[in-house]
Image (tube, rainbow, N blue to C red):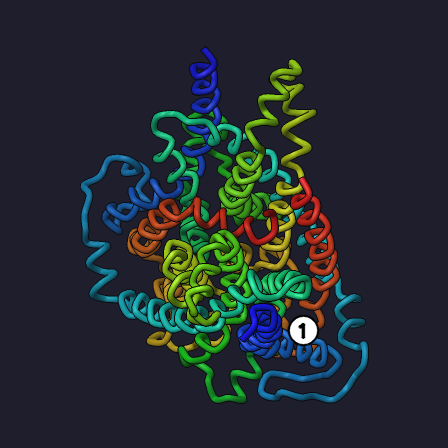
Protein backbone atom coordinates (compact mmCIF):
# COMPACT_ATOMS: atom_id res chain seq x y z
CA UNK A 1 0.00 0.00 0.00
CA UNK A 2 1.46 3.42 -0.93
CA UNK A 3 2.28 5.60 2.05
CA UNK A 4 0.01 8.53 1.14
CA UNK A 5 -3.02 6.31 0.68
CA UNK A 6 -2.39 4.60 4.00
CA UNK A 7 -2.19 7.97 5.71
CA UNK A 8 -5.47 9.15 4.24
CA UNK A 9 -7.08 5.84 5.10
CA UNK A 10 -5.91 6.28 8.65
CA UNK A 11 -7.31 9.80 9.08
CA UNK A 12 -10.64 8.62 7.76
CA UNK A 13 -10.58 5.79 10.20
CA UNK A 14 -9.58 8.19 12.95
CA UNK A 15 -12.85 10.07 12.62
CA UNK A 16 -14.74 6.81 12.79
CA UNK A 17 -12.70 5.57 15.72
CA UNK A 18 -13.18 8.85 17.59
CA UNK A 19 -16.93 8.61 17.16
CA UNK A 20 -16.85 5.01 18.34
CA UNK A 21 -14.85 5.87 21.46
CA UNK A 22 -16.82 8.98 22.39
CA UNK A 23 -20.38 7.84 21.72
CA UNK A 24 -20.80 5.66 24.85
CA UNK A 25 -19.88 8.65 27.01
CA UNK A 26 -22.22 10.98 25.12
CA UNK A 27 -25.01 8.40 25.36
CA UNK A 28 -24.38 7.95 29.10
CA UNK A 29 -24.39 11.67 29.81
CA UNK A 30 -27.41 12.24 27.59
CA UNK A 31 -29.37 9.57 29.46
CA UNK A 32 -28.25 10.51 32.95
CA UNK A 33 -28.12 14.30 32.71
CA UNK A 34 -30.03 15.36 29.60
CA UNK A 35 -33.12 13.20 30.11
CA UNK A 36 -33.60 14.05 33.83
CA UNK A 37 -33.06 17.72 33.06
CA UNK A 38 -35.78 17.57 30.38
CA UNK A 39 -37.97 15.62 32.79
CA UNK A 40 -37.43 18.29 35.44
CA UNK A 41 -38.59 20.98 33.02
CA UNK A 42 -41.61 18.86 32.05
CA UNK A 43 -42.54 18.09 35.67
CA UNK A 44 -42.32 21.77 36.59
CA UNK A 45 -45.28 22.40 34.23
CA UNK A 46 -47.40 19.67 35.81
CA UNK A 47 -49.09 19.03 39.14
CA UNK A 48 -47.17 15.76 39.62
CA UNK A 49 -46.98 14.52 43.18
CA UNK A 50 -44.88 11.82 44.82
CA UNK A 51 -45.92 8.43 43.51
CA UNK A 52 -46.45 9.32 39.88
CA UNK A 53 -44.13 10.17 37.02
CA UNK A 54 -46.68 12.31 35.22
CA UNK A 55 -49.25 14.85 36.18
CA UNK A 56 -51.79 17.19 34.69
CA UNK A 57 -50.33 19.98 32.55
CA UNK A 58 -50.86 23.19 34.48
CA UNK A 59 -48.61 25.55 32.55
CA UNK A 60 -46.78 28.15 34.58
CA UNK A 61 -48.88 27.67 37.72
CA UNK A 62 -45.98 26.13 39.70
CA UNK A 63 -43.68 28.99 38.83
CA UNK A 64 -46.36 31.51 39.65
CA UNK A 65 -47.19 29.98 43.02
CA UNK A 66 -43.50 29.65 43.90
CA UNK A 67 -42.85 33.26 42.94
CA UNK A 68 -45.75 34.57 45.03
CA UNK A 69 -44.58 32.64 48.07
CA UNK A 70 -42.60 34.77 50.52
CA UNK A 71 -40.57 31.75 51.67
CA UNK A 72 -39.43 31.24 48.10
CA UNK A 73 -38.45 34.88 47.64
CA UNK A 74 -36.53 34.78 50.91
CA UNK A 75 -34.86 31.56 49.83
CA UNK A 76 -33.75 33.20 46.59
CA UNK A 77 -32.31 36.12 48.53
CA UNK A 78 -30.64 33.83 51.09
CA UNK A 79 -29.03 31.86 48.26
CA UNK A 80 -27.53 35.10 46.93
CA UNK A 81 -26.24 36.16 50.35
CA UNK A 82 -24.97 32.71 51.25
CA UNK A 83 -23.09 32.45 47.95
CA UNK A 84 -21.70 35.97 47.61
CA UNK A 85 -20.48 36.45 51.18
CA UNK A 86 -18.91 33.01 51.53
CA UNK A 87 -17.17 33.30 48.16
CA UNK A 88 -15.94 36.84 48.85
CA UNK A 89 -14.30 35.54 52.04
CA UNK A 90 -12.87 32.61 50.11
CA UNK A 91 -11.32 34.79 47.38
CA UNK A 92 -9.49 37.06 49.83
CA UNK A 93 -8.25 34.21 52.04
CA UNK A 94 -7.32 31.91 49.15
CA UNK A 95 -5.32 34.68 47.49
CA UNK A 96 -3.29 35.23 50.65
CA UNK A 97 -2.92 31.55 51.43
CA UNK A 98 -1.81 30.62 47.91
CA UNK A 99 0.88 33.32 47.93
CA UNK A 100 2.15 31.88 51.21
CA UNK A 101 2.02 28.24 50.13
CA UNK A 102 3.79 28.82 46.79
CA UNK A 103 7.08 29.47 48.61
CA UNK A 104 9.39 26.68 49.71
CA UNK A 105 9.77 26.42 53.48
CA UNK A 106 10.37 23.67 56.03
CA UNK A 107 7.12 22.08 57.20
CA UNK A 108 5.25 23.00 54.02
CA UNK A 109 4.01 19.44 53.50
CA UNK A 110 2.39 19.31 56.93
CA UNK A 111 0.82 22.75 56.65
CA UNK A 112 -0.55 21.97 53.19
CA UNK A 113 -2.03 18.75 54.58
CA UNK A 114 -3.78 20.70 57.33
CA UNK A 115 -5.07 23.27 54.83
CA UNK A 116 -6.45 20.55 52.56
CA UNK A 117 -8.34 18.71 55.33
CA UNK A 118 -11.69 20.52 54.98
CA UNK A 119 -11.81 19.81 51.25
CA UNK A 120 -10.75 16.16 51.45
CA UNK A 121 -13.13 15.15 54.25
CA UNK A 122 -16.75 14.38 53.26
CA UNK A 123 -18.69 17.59 53.86
CA UNK A 124 -21.87 15.75 54.87
CA UNK A 125 -19.86 14.38 57.80
CA UNK A 126 -17.85 17.45 58.75
CA UNK A 127 -21.03 19.56 58.69
CA UNK A 128 -22.32 17.31 61.50
CA UNK A 129 -19.10 18.08 63.33
CA UNK A 130 -20.04 21.75 63.18
CA UNK A 131 -23.44 20.88 64.59
CA UNK A 132 -21.49 19.91 67.71
CA UNK A 133 -19.13 22.91 67.61
CA UNK A 134 -22.22 25.14 67.41
CA UNK A 135 -23.96 23.36 70.30
CA UNK A 136 -25.86 25.96 72.35
CA UNK A 137 -24.47 24.62 75.67
CA UNK A 138 -21.07 23.12 74.94
CA UNK A 139 -19.85 25.04 71.89
CA UNK A 140 -16.05 25.14 71.76
CA UNK A 141 -16.24 28.46 69.90
CA UNK A 142 -18.21 29.92 72.79
CA UNK A 143 -15.62 28.52 75.21
CA UNK A 144 -12.86 30.46 73.40
CA UNK A 145 -14.92 33.65 73.24
CA UNK A 146 -15.74 33.46 76.95
CA UNK A 147 -12.14 32.84 77.93
CA UNK A 148 -10.93 35.67 75.71
CA UNK A 149 -13.56 37.84 77.48
CA UNK A 150 -15.22 38.64 74.17
CA UNK A 151 -18.57 37.26 75.25
CA UNK A 152 -20.46 37.63 78.49
CA UNK A 153 -21.28 34.38 80.31
CA UNK A 154 -24.86 35.46 80.90
CA UNK A 155 -25.51 36.09 77.20
CA UNK A 156 -24.00 33.19 75.29
CA UNK A 157 -24.36 33.10 71.49
CA UNK A 158 -26.88 30.65 70.10
CA UNK A 159 -25.00 29.86 66.89
CA UNK A 160 -27.77 28.11 65.00
CA UNK A 161 -30.79 29.20 67.02
CA UNK A 162 -31.28 32.83 66.00
CA UNK A 163 -31.82 33.92 62.38
CA UNK A 164 -28.83 36.24 61.98
CA UNK A 165 -26.35 34.01 63.82
CA UNK A 166 -27.56 30.95 61.90
CA UNK A 167 -26.89 32.58 58.52
CA UNK A 168 -23.40 33.68 59.63
CA UNK A 169 -22.70 30.19 60.96
CA UNK A 170 -23.58 28.38 57.75
CA UNK A 171 -21.67 30.95 55.67
CA UNK A 172 -18.61 30.29 57.84
CA UNK A 173 -18.82 26.54 57.29
CA UNK A 174 -19.26 26.96 53.54
CA UNK A 175 -16.25 29.31 53.31
CA UNK A 176 -14.20 26.90 55.46
CA UNK A 177 -15.07 24.07 53.12
CA UNK A 178 -14.44 25.83 49.75
CA UNK A 179 -11.27 27.70 50.80
CA UNK A 180 -8.84 24.77 50.30
CA UNK A 181 -10.18 24.07 46.80
CA UNK A 182 -9.88 27.72 45.75
CA UNK A 183 -6.38 27.88 47.24
CA UNK A 184 -5.33 24.85 45.23
CA UNK A 185 -6.57 26.33 41.94
CA UNK A 186 -5.00 29.73 42.77
CA UNK A 187 -1.71 27.91 43.41
CA UNK A 188 -1.94 26.35 39.97
CA UNK A 189 -2.52 29.82 38.52
CA UNK A 190 0.51 31.31 40.24
CA UNK A 191 2.82 28.45 39.35
CA UNK A 192 1.76 28.61 35.68
CA UNK A 193 3.46 32.02 35.35
CA UNK A 194 6.77 31.34 33.58
CA UNK A 195 9.97 32.19 35.45
CA UNK A 196 10.99 34.49 32.55
CA UNK A 197 8.08 36.81 33.30
CA UNK A 198 9.27 37.09 36.89
CA UNK A 199 12.83 37.77 35.77
CA UNK A 200 11.75 40.36 33.20
CA UNK A 201 9.63 42.10 35.82
CA UNK A 202 12.59 42.15 38.20
CA UNK A 203 14.82 43.61 35.43
CA UNK A 204 12.32 46.39 34.86
CA UNK A 205 12.38 47.15 38.56
CA UNK A 206 8.91 45.85 39.43
CA UNK A 207 8.93 44.57 43.01
CA UNK A 208 6.53 43.88 45.86
CA UNK A 209 3.04 45.27 45.49
CA UNK A 210 3.77 46.97 42.17
CA UNK A 211 4.87 43.69 40.66
CA UNK A 212 1.84 41.96 42.13
CA UNK A 213 -0.57 44.58 40.74
CA UNK A 214 0.90 45.02 37.25
CA UNK A 215 2.44 41.63 36.50
CA UNK A 216 1.29 38.75 38.71
CA UNK A 217 -2.37 39.69 39.16
CA UNK A 218 -3.31 40.14 35.47
CA UNK A 219 -1.64 36.84 34.62
CA UNK A 220 -3.38 34.95 37.44
CA UNK A 221 -6.74 36.56 36.98
CA UNK A 222 -8.34 34.27 34.37
CA UNK A 223 -7.60 31.06 36.29
CA UNK A 224 -8.58 32.72 39.57
CA UNK A 225 -11.91 33.73 38.07
CA UNK A 226 -12.52 30.15 36.95
CA UNK A 227 -11.88 29.02 40.54
CA UNK A 228 -14.34 31.62 41.83
CA UNK A 229 -16.98 30.56 39.30
CA UNK A 230 -16.60 26.99 40.54
CA UNK A 231 -17.02 28.16 44.10
CA UNK A 232 -20.18 30.04 43.14
CA UNK A 233 -21.70 27.00 41.44
CA UNK A 234 -20.74 24.63 44.26
CA UNK A 235 -22.22 27.00 46.82
CA UNK A 236 -25.40 28.18 45.13
CA UNK A 237 -26.44 24.70 43.99
CA UNK A 238 -25.38 22.70 47.02
CA UNK A 239 -27.65 21.87 49.91
CA UNK A 240 -25.50 19.82 52.28
CA UNK A 241 -24.36 22.59 54.64
CA UNK A 242 -27.74 24.33 55.16
CA UNK A 243 -29.61 21.01 55.14
CA UNK A 244 -27.53 19.45 57.90
CA UNK A 245 -26.89 22.50 60.06
CA UNK A 246 -30.26 24.26 60.04
CA UNK A 247 -32.52 22.58 57.49
CA UNK A 248 -33.68 26.07 56.55
CA UNK A 249 -34.52 27.17 60.08
CA UNK A 250 -34.97 28.93 62.41
CA UNK A 251 -38.18 30.36 60.90
CA UNK A 252 -36.89 29.79 57.34
CA UNK A 253 -34.10 32.29 57.98
CA UNK A 254 -31.52 30.06 56.28
CA UNK A 255 -33.85 28.55 53.70
CA UNK A 256 -32.04 28.47 50.34
CA UNK A 257 -33.35 27.37 46.93
CA UNK A 258 -32.01 23.84 47.26
CA UNK A 259 -33.37 23.12 50.74
CA UNK A 260 -36.72 24.65 49.79
CA UNK A 261 -36.89 22.52 46.63
CA UNK A 262 -36.12 19.43 48.74
CA UNK A 263 -38.75 20.26 51.34
CA UNK A 264 -41.38 21.05 48.71
CA UNK A 265 -40.56 18.18 46.35
CA UNK A 266 -39.62 15.33 48.69
CA UNK A 267 -40.97 16.11 52.17
CA UNK A 268 -44.24 17.69 51.00
CA UNK A 269 -44.43 15.56 47.86
CA UNK A 270 -45.10 18.34 45.37
CA UNK A 271 -42.68 17.13 42.74
CA UNK A 272 -43.87 19.65 40.13
CA UNK A 273 -43.45 22.71 42.30
CA UNK A 274 -40.16 21.41 43.75
CA UNK A 275 -38.81 21.02 40.21
CA UNK A 276 -39.92 24.55 39.37
CA UNK A 277 -38.08 25.91 42.43
CA UNK A 278 -34.90 24.01 41.57
CA UNK A 279 -35.05 25.24 37.98
CA UNK A 280 -34.63 28.81 39.17
CA UNK A 281 -30.95 27.81 39.48
CA UNK A 282 -30.72 27.25 35.73
CA UNK A 283 -30.21 30.90 34.64
CA UNK A 284 -27.38 31.23 37.15
CA UNK A 285 -25.77 28.03 35.86
CA UNK A 286 -26.05 29.22 32.26
CA UNK A 287 -24.48 32.55 33.15
CA UNK A 288 -21.59 30.89 34.99
CA UNK A 289 -21.05 28.44 32.12
CA UNK A 290 -20.77 31.28 29.60
CA UNK A 291 -18.39 33.21 31.85
CA UNK A 292 -16.31 30.10 32.37
CA UNK A 293 -15.94 29.48 28.64
CA UNK A 294 -14.90 33.09 28.15
CA UNK A 295 -12.26 33.07 30.87
CA UNK A 296 -10.99 29.58 30.11
CA UNK A 297 -10.19 30.82 26.59
CA UNK A 298 -8.45 33.90 28.02
CA UNK A 299 -6.38 31.68 30.31
CA UNK A 300 -5.37 29.61 27.33
CA UNK A 301 -4.15 32.59 25.32
CA UNK A 302 -1.84 33.86 28.05
CA UNK B 1 17.94 37.63 52.79
CA UNK B 2 15.12 37.06 50.33
CA UNK B 3 14.65 33.45 51.44
CA UNK B 4 14.44 34.68 55.02
CA UNK B 5 11.77 37.22 54.10
CA UNK B 6 9.97 34.66 51.96
CA UNK B 7 9.83 32.24 54.85
CA UNK B 8 8.68 34.84 57.32
CA UNK B 9 5.84 35.81 54.99
CA UNK B 10 4.92 32.17 54.36
CA UNK B 11 4.79 31.29 58.06
CA UNK B 12 2.85 34.39 59.13
CA UNK B 13 0.21 33.68 56.49
CA UNK B 14 0.06 29.90 56.31
CA UNK B 15 0.33 28.95 59.99
CA UNK B 16 -2.74 30.89 61.19
CA UNK B 17 -4.83 29.65 58.26
CA UNK B 18 -3.82 26.03 58.73
CA UNK B 19 -4.68 26.28 62.43
CA UNK B 20 -8.11 27.73 61.61
CA UNK B 21 -8.84 25.21 58.88
CA UNK B 22 -7.64 22.17 60.81
CA UNK B 23 -8.93 23.11 64.26
CA UNK B 24 -12.35 21.47 63.73
CA UNK B 25 -10.58 18.14 63.15
CA UNK B 26 -8.48 18.57 66.24
CA UNK B 27 -11.59 19.24 68.30
CA UNK B 28 -13.36 16.25 66.75
CA UNK B 29 -10.42 14.09 67.83
CA UNK B 30 -10.51 15.47 71.38
CA UNK B 31 -14.27 14.92 71.64
CA UNK B 32 -14.05 11.42 70.20
CA UNK B 33 -11.88 10.31 73.16
CA UNK B 34 -14.09 11.92 75.79
CA UNK B 35 -16.44 9.74 77.88
CA UNK B 36 -19.95 10.34 76.57
CA UNK B 37 -21.31 11.42 79.96
CA UNK B 38 -18.77 14.24 80.21
CA UNK B 39 -19.26 16.11 76.93
CA UNK B 40 -21.60 18.68 78.49
CA UNK B 41 -19.57 19.06 81.68
CA UNK B 42 -17.93 22.52 81.57
CA UNK B 43 -15.20 21.43 84.00
CA UNK B 44 -14.21 18.60 81.65
CA UNK B 45 -13.72 20.68 78.49
CA UNK B 46 -10.00 19.87 78.36
CA UNK B 47 -9.30 17.66 81.38
CA UNK B 48 -10.74 14.16 81.20
CA UNK B 49 -9.66 10.53 81.07
CA UNK B 50 -9.47 9.57 77.40
CA UNK B 51 -11.38 6.46 76.40
CA UNK B 52 -11.73 4.32 73.30
CA UNK B 53 -15.27 3.32 74.30
CA UNK B 54 -16.81 5.59 71.65
CA UNK B 55 -14.93 3.82 68.86
CA UNK B 56 -16.04 0.45 70.25
CA UNK B 57 -19.63 1.66 70.39
CA UNK B 58 -19.40 2.76 66.77
CA UNK B 59 -18.12 -0.60 65.54
CA UNK B 60 -20.26 -2.90 67.68
CA UNK B 61 -23.57 -1.13 68.21
CA UNK B 62 -24.22 0.83 65.04
CA UNK B 63 -24.37 0.11 61.31
CA UNK B 64 -21.15 2.07 60.81
CA UNK B 65 -19.07 -0.73 59.28
CA UNK B 66 -21.97 -1.65 57.05
CA UNK B 67 -22.32 1.93 55.78
CA UNK B 68 -18.59 2.03 55.04
CA UNK B 69 -18.95 -1.24 53.20
CA UNK B 70 -21.92 0.11 51.21
CA UNK B 71 -20.05 3.30 50.34
CA UNK B 72 -16.97 1.38 49.21
CA UNK B 73 -19.04 -1.09 47.22
CA UNK B 74 -20.87 1.67 45.35
CA UNK B 75 -17.57 3.53 44.97
CA UNK B 76 -15.74 0.60 43.41
CA UNK B 77 -18.52 -0.31 40.97
CA UNK B 78 -18.99 3.33 39.93
CA UNK B 79 -15.24 3.84 39.47
CA UNK B 80 -15.03 0.78 37.19
CA UNK B 81 -18.07 1.88 35.16
CA UNK B 82 -16.70 5.40 34.93
CA UNK B 83 -13.29 4.28 33.70
CA UNK B 84 -14.85 1.99 31.07
CA UNK B 85 -16.75 4.93 29.59
CA UNK B 86 -14.36 7.79 30.29
CA UNK B 87 -10.98 6.36 29.23
CA UNK B 88 -11.90 5.83 25.55
CA UNK B 89 -13.78 9.14 25.42
CA UNK B 90 -11.00 11.09 27.14
CA UNK B 91 -8.41 9.64 24.78
CA UNK B 92 -10.48 10.31 21.67
CA UNK B 93 -11.20 13.88 22.75
CA UNK B 94 -7.54 14.54 23.52
CA UNK B 95 -6.07 13.01 20.37
CA UNK B 96 -8.42 11.96 17.62
CA UNK B 97 -10.92 14.73 17.14
CA UNK B 98 -9.89 18.25 16.24
CA UNK B 99 -12.06 21.33 16.74
CA UNK B 100 -15.29 19.39 17.14
CA UNK B 101 -13.64 17.37 19.88
CA UNK B 102 -12.56 20.48 21.75
CA UNK B 103 -16.07 21.88 21.75
CA UNK B 104 -17.50 18.52 22.74
CA UNK B 105 -14.95 18.20 25.54
CA UNK B 106 -15.97 21.55 26.99
CA UNK B 107 -19.66 20.66 26.59
CA UNK B 108 -19.12 17.42 28.50
CA UNK B 109 -17.30 19.31 31.21
CA UNK B 110 -20.17 21.78 31.54
CA UNK B 111 -22.57 18.92 32.29
CA UNK B 112 -20.46 18.36 35.40
CA UNK B 113 -21.79 21.70 36.59
CA UNK B 114 -25.42 20.52 36.46
CA UNK B 115 -25.95 19.83 40.17
CA UNK B 116 -27.69 16.87 41.84
CA UNK B 117 -30.04 19.38 43.48
CA UNK B 118 -31.50 20.06 40.02
CA UNK B 119 -31.85 16.42 38.99
CA UNK B 120 -32.81 14.56 42.17
CA UNK B 121 -36.56 15.22 41.85
CA UNK B 122 -37.06 13.76 38.35
CA UNK B 123 -34.53 11.02 39.09
CA UNK B 124 -36.39 10.04 42.26
CA UNK B 125 -39.44 9.31 40.08
CA UNK B 126 -37.36 7.37 37.55
CA UNK B 127 -35.76 5.32 40.32
CA UNK B 128 -39.21 4.54 41.73
CA UNK B 129 -40.49 3.45 38.32
CA UNK B 130 -37.49 1.15 37.89
CA UNK B 131 -38.23 -0.42 41.30
CA UNK B 132 -34.79 0.63 42.51
CA UNK B 133 -35.92 2.68 45.51
CA UNK B 134 -33.87 1.95 48.62
CA UNK B 135 -31.34 -0.12 46.71
CA UNK B 136 -27.65 0.54 46.21
CA UNK B 137 -28.22 -0.09 42.50
CA UNK B 138 -30.05 3.24 42.35
CA UNK B 139 -26.87 5.03 43.41
CA UNK B 140 -24.71 2.96 41.06
CA UNK B 141 -27.03 3.94 38.20
CA UNK B 142 -27.11 7.65 39.00
CA UNK B 143 -23.59 8.47 40.20
CA UNK B 144 -21.93 8.19 36.78
CA UNK B 145 -23.95 11.29 35.83
CA UNK B 146 -21.32 13.38 37.62
CA UNK B 147 -18.33 11.01 37.73
CA UNK B 148 -18.19 10.45 33.95
CA UNK B 149 -17.91 14.16 32.94
CA UNK B 150 -15.45 14.74 35.79
CA UNK B 151 -13.26 11.77 34.83
CA UNK B 152 -13.33 12.57 31.10
CA UNK B 153 -12.15 16.07 31.87
CA UNK B 154 -9.24 14.91 34.04
CA UNK B 155 -8.26 12.16 31.59
CA UNK B 156 -8.24 14.61 28.66
CA UNK B 157 -5.70 16.65 30.56
CA UNK B 158 -3.52 13.62 31.28
CA UNK B 159 -3.66 12.17 27.75
CA UNK B 160 -2.73 15.52 26.22
CA UNK B 161 0.43 15.46 28.31
CA UNK B 162 1.57 12.14 26.77
CA UNK B 163 4.16 12.88 24.04
CA UNK B 164 2.75 12.21 20.58
CA UNK B 165 6.06 10.67 19.45
CA UNK B 166 5.44 7.67 21.71
CA UNK B 167 2.26 6.77 19.88
CA UNK B 168 3.68 7.60 16.46
CA UNK B 169 6.50 5.18 17.10
CA UNK B 170 4.03 2.46 18.08
CA UNK B 171 1.91 3.15 14.98
CA UNK B 172 5.03 2.92 12.79
CA UNK B 173 5.76 -0.45 14.30
CA UNK B 174 2.39 -1.62 13.03
CA UNK B 175 0.32 -1.11 16.13
CA UNK B 176 -3.31 -0.17 15.60
CA UNK B 177 -4.66 3.00 17.19
CA UNK B 178 -6.42 1.02 19.89
CA UNK B 179 -3.31 -1.10 20.35
CA UNK B 180 -1.26 2.06 20.85
CA UNK B 181 -3.77 3.28 23.42
CA UNK B 182 -3.68 0.06 25.41
CA UNK B 183 0.03 -0.77 25.10
CA UNK B 184 1.67 2.64 25.04
CA UNK B 185 -0.58 5.46 26.27
CA UNK B 186 -2.26 3.72 29.20
CA UNK B 187 0.94 2.37 30.78
CA UNK B 188 2.57 5.82 30.81
CA UNK B 189 -0.69 7.34 32.12
CA UNK B 190 -0.90 5.10 35.19
CA UNK B 191 -0.27 7.93 37.70
CA UNK B 192 -3.02 9.94 35.96
CA UNK B 193 -5.37 6.96 36.02
CA UNK B 194 -4.75 6.46 39.74
CA UNK B 195 -5.53 10.14 40.30
CA UNK B 196 -8.82 9.73 38.43
CA UNK B 197 -9.67 6.62 40.46
CA UNK B 198 -8.97 8.38 43.77
CA UNK B 199 -10.87 11.56 43.03
CA UNK B 200 -13.80 9.75 41.40
CA UNK B 201 -14.03 7.42 44.38
CA UNK B 202 -14.00 10.33 46.79
CA UNK B 203 -16.76 12.11 44.81
CA UNK B 204 -18.87 8.99 45.35
CA UNK B 205 -18.03 8.75 49.06
CA UNK B 206 -18.89 12.45 49.43
CA UNK B 207 -22.27 12.31 47.67
CA UNK B 208 -25.21 13.17 49.88
CA UNK B 209 -28.25 14.51 47.98
CA UNK B 210 -29.02 11.39 45.91
CA UNK B 211 -28.20 9.04 48.77
CA UNK B 212 -30.60 10.73 51.16
CA UNK B 213 -33.34 10.89 48.52
CA UNK B 214 -33.16 7.31 47.23
CA UNK B 215 -32.13 5.25 50.26
CA UNK B 216 -34.56 4.82 53.14
CA UNK B 217 -33.54 1.77 55.18
CA UNK B 218 -30.68 1.71 57.63
CA UNK B 219 -28.94 -1.35 56.19
CA UNK B 220 -28.66 0.24 52.74
CA UNK B 221 -27.37 3.60 53.87
CA UNK B 222 -24.06 4.95 52.76
CA UNK B 223 -21.58 6.60 55.09
CA UNK B 224 -22.63 10.21 54.49
CA UNK B 225 -26.30 9.43 55.11
CA UNK B 226 -25.96 6.80 57.83
CA UNK B 227 -24.03 9.03 60.20
CA UNK B 228 -26.40 12.05 60.18
CA UNK B 229 -29.58 9.94 60.29
CA UNK B 230 -28.88 6.82 62.35
CA UNK B 231 -26.32 7.96 64.91
CA UNK B 232 -28.87 10.45 66.16
CA UNK B 233 -31.26 8.56 68.43
CA UNK B 234 -34.31 10.72 68.65
CA UNK B 235 -33.05 14.01 69.98
CA UNK B 236 -30.17 12.24 71.69
CA UNK B 237 -26.79 12.66 70.08
CA UNK B 238 -23.84 10.46 70.94
CA UNK B 239 -21.39 13.25 70.13
CA UNK B 240 -18.11 11.43 70.83
CA UNK B 241 -19.24 8.49 68.69
CA UNK B 242 -20.28 10.82 65.88
CA UNK B 243 -16.93 12.63 66.00
CA UNK B 244 -15.12 9.29 65.73
CA UNK B 245 -17.33 8.39 62.77
CA UNK B 246 -16.38 11.62 60.97
CA UNK B 247 -12.64 11.40 61.67
CA UNK B 248 -12.06 7.80 60.61
CA UNK B 249 -12.78 8.24 56.88
CA UNK B 250 -11.54 11.84 56.72
CA UNK B 251 -7.90 11.23 57.63
CA UNK B 252 -7.08 8.60 54.96
CA UNK B 253 -8.95 10.64 52.34
CA UNK B 254 -6.92 13.72 53.23
CA UNK B 255 -3.67 11.73 53.02
CA UNK B 256 -4.35 10.47 49.49
CA UNK B 257 -5.59 13.94 48.43
CA UNK B 258 -2.31 15.37 49.60
CA UNK B 259 -0.28 12.72 47.81
CA UNK B 260 -2.08 13.14 44.48
CA UNK B 261 -2.84 16.85 44.63
CA UNK B 262 -0.23 17.99 42.10
CA UNK B 263 -1.39 15.47 39.54
CA UNK B 264 -5.00 16.42 40.13
CA UNK B 265 -4.18 20.07 39.42
CA UNK B 266 -2.35 19.11 36.23
CA UNK B 267 -5.35 17.18 34.96
CA UNK B 268 -7.98 19.59 36.17
CA UNK B 269 -6.38 22.72 34.71
CA UNK B 270 -4.54 20.92 31.90
CA UNK B 271 -7.71 20.15 29.97
CA UNK B 272 -8.43 23.82 29.39
CA UNK B 273 -5.41 25.89 30.17
CA UNK B 274 -2.73 24.28 28.05
Task: Residue at 44% x, 61% y: name it.
Answer: B200
Q: Which of B1/B64 is in front?
A: B1
Instruction: Please give the residue where the numbered disc 1 appears in the rendered image.
Output: A275
Q: Which of A46/A114 is in front?
A: A114
Residue A212 horizontal/vertical position (percent)? 63, 24
Q: Quadrant of residue B1?
A: top left
Up/down of A238 relative to A21, above or below: above
Viewed as shown, does residue B50 lie left or right of A192? left
Query: In which quadrant of the rendered image does the C terminus of chain A lie?
Result: top right
Up/down of B8 relative to B125, above or below: above
Task: Residue at 68% x, 52% y: name it.
Answer: A292
Viewed as shown, does residue B266 lie left or right of B252? right
Which residue is the extreme one toward the front? Answer: A2
Viewed as shown, does residue A252 lie left or right of A108? right
Q: Quadrant of residue A265?
A: bottom right
Residue B45 horizontal/vertical position (percent)? 31, 37
Amino acid sequence: MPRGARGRYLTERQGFLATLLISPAVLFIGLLVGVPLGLAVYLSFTDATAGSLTGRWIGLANYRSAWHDTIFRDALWHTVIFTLISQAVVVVCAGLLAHGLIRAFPGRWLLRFLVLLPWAAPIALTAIGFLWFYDPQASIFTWFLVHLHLVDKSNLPNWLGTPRAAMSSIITVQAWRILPFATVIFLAGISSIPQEVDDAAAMDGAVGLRKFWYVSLPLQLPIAIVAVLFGIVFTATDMVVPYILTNGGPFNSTQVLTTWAFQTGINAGNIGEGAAIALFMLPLLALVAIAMLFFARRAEVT
Amino acid sequence: MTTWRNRAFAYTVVVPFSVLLAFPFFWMAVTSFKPEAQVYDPTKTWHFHPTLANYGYLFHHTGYLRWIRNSCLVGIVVVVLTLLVAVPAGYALARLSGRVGRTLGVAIFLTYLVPPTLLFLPLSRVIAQLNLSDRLWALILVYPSFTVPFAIWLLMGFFKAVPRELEDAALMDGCSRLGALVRVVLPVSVPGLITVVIFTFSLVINEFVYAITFISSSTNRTLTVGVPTDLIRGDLFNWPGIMAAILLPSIPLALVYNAFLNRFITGFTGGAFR
